[in-house]
Image (tube, rainbow, N blue to C red):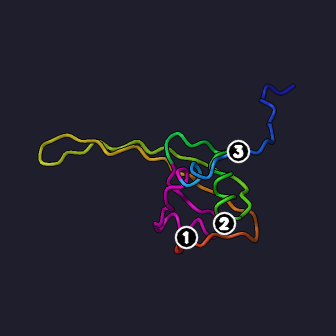
Amino acid sequence: MSRARAFKNETTKVSSERMYEVIRHPVVTEKSTLGSEHNQITFVVPLDATKPEIKAAIEEIFKVKVKAVNTLRNKGKVKRFRGLKGKRSDVKKAFVTLDEGHSIDVTTGI
C-alpha cells in the first residue's frame, strides 16, 4: 500500500481581486520564450501564492485550460552598491503548462 496522500480534485475558489494579485506579470526572456514550444508560459507571482490559486486565476483570466503548474522560488542576491550592502527581493515564478490547442498571447494586455 502506498503512503502517498490521496489527491483531492477540488476546484479552488479565488476572488476576482485575488486573481489579479496572483498573476503579477509574464516573464519575457529568451529562456522563457523557449518554453512556448512546449505550451509553457512563465509568470511572476507573490510568494504566498499556491499552485491551485495560480491555476484557477490563469483559467479564469485568460479562459484557457491549464494542464500543470510548476513553481520556483528565487532567493534574492546580496549585492554591494558603493560599499553598502543590500539585498534584492525574493521572487516566485510560476511555469504554467497549457493543454493542447490553448495559447496565451503575452504581448497583449489583460
Q: Mark 3 points at which residue?
A: 13
| SS state under label 1 | loop
Residue at the image point whose x is 55% and y is 55% from the top: 20
Circle nearer the viewer, 2 or 3: 3
**Could you classify mark 2 by the number of other residues whose Cα lies within 10 Å: few (under 14), some (14-19), or many (20 or more)?**
some
Q: Does the magenta stretch include residue 39?
A: yes
**Could you classify mark 1 by the number of other residues whose Cα lies within 10 Å: few (under 14), some (14-19), or many (20 or more)?**
some
Judge by depth and name the residue closer to the eye, 28 or 16.
Answer: 16
Residues at circles 1 and 3 in contact by the CB criterion of under 8 Å: no
Quick one: label 2 or label 1, which is nearer the N terminus?
2
Circle nearer the viewer, 2 or 1: 1
| SS state under label 2 | loop
Quick one: label 1 or label 3, which is nearer the N terminus?
3
Q: Position of residue 35 (x, y in %)?
A: 59, 65
Q: In this view, does 38 lie above or below 69?
A: below
Q: Where is residue 82 in the image (x, y as percent from the top left)?
A: 12, 48
> Magenta span covers which residues?
21-45
On the rendered structure, is 39 left or right of 92? right
Amino acid type, residue under disc 2 in the picture: Asn
Q: Distance between the residues labelled 2 and 3?
A: 25 Å
Residue at the image point whose x is 49% and y is 60% from the top: 25
Q: Mark 1 points at which residue?
A: 106
**Could you classify mark 3 by the number of other residues whose Cα lies within 10 Å: few (under 14), some (14-19), or many (20 or more)?**
few
Q: In this view, does 69 lie above or below 1?
A: below
Q: Distance between the residues labelled 1 and 3?
A: 24 Å
On the rendered structure, is 82 left or right of 92? left
| SS state under label 3 | loop
Q: What is the total number of numbered labels drawn onto the structure image?
A: 3
Q: Mark 2 points at which residue?
A: 39
Residue at the image point whose x is 71% and y is 64% from the top: 64
Judge by depth and name the residue closer to the eye, 22 or 3.
Answer: 22
Q: Where is residue 21 in the image (x, y as percent from the top left)?
A: 52, 51
